[in-house]
Image (spheres, rainbow, N blue to C red):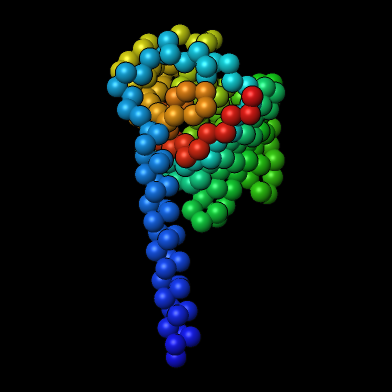
Amino acid sequence: MVGDCLRLVSKCVERTIILVFLIQLVGCTLDTVKDTSDFALSDRSAAEKLNNWNFEGRIAVILKDDSWSGSLNWVQSSELGIIKISGPLGQGGLEIKVKAGNLSINDGESIVEYSDQDEESIVNELGFYVPIRSLVYWVRGLADPDIDLIEIDQGFMQSGWQVLFKAMQETEVGLMPHKVFLTNESVRLKLIVDQWVINE
């Protein structure tokens, strides 16, 4: 009887400690998130130099007649980008590899390869189009250097896309995006980066 009570008390104490730790962890995460009211492309010099990085986060895609969300893992080196997207609870999955202007899309059943500028084929595979070559810059809080831009509050416009940085987070190389909203006339993308890992 006493032994059962002690085990019950021990479990309660363990759960309390875990709960306190999680609350502190969330608090620490929130402390590193910064407002973007003063976002400026001129402050992005450190991000421009990054060649090797990765992050884990979440993505939401909102179309005119459909929407979905999932987890997102992006690993980028100077030569290759690997983007993995999975649905809720890990269901389904998609892997996109980007290298030298080409991309391959693996949905678990087949692998197809395209130019990263082949808008029609990418729409057929993903259900929407996003310029992945530019996205490599946008997720870092940068404008694509090969495309004209218009600076706006909290971001910029490029290639018919509105790119807004709703929140930034502290990293070892300074502020990096935490919430990125991408919008054009047919699709809205919401990216939330939970953790940046810089591998320079």
Which residue is located at x 52 percent, y 27 percent?
Answer: 172
Closer to us: 16 or 181: 16
Residue 175 image position (x, y, % from top left) = 44, 24
> Residue 30 lies in what quarter of the image?
top left
Residue 12 image position (x, y, % from top left) = 41, 71
Which residue is located at x 44 percent, y 60 percent?
Answer: 18
> Residue 112 lies in what quarter of the image?
top right
Quadrant of the image containing the C terminus? top right
Whether 31 is drawn above or below 46: the answer is: below
Which residue is located at x 55 percent, y 24 percent?
Answer: 136
Residue 8 image position (x, y, % from top left) = 43, 78
Whether 47 is drawn above or below 128: the answer is: above
Whether 51 is drawn above or below 88: the answer is: above
Closer to us: 156 or 10: 10
Closer to us: 31 or 136: 31
Which residue is located at x 63 percent, y 21 percent?
Answer: 51
The answer, for residue 27, to whether it is visible in the render is yes
Whether 145 is drawn above or below 9: the answer is: above
Label total for image: 0
Residue 71 image position (x, y, % from top left) = 51, 45
The answer, for residue 114, to whether it is visible in the render is no
Quadrant of the image containing the N terminus? bottom left
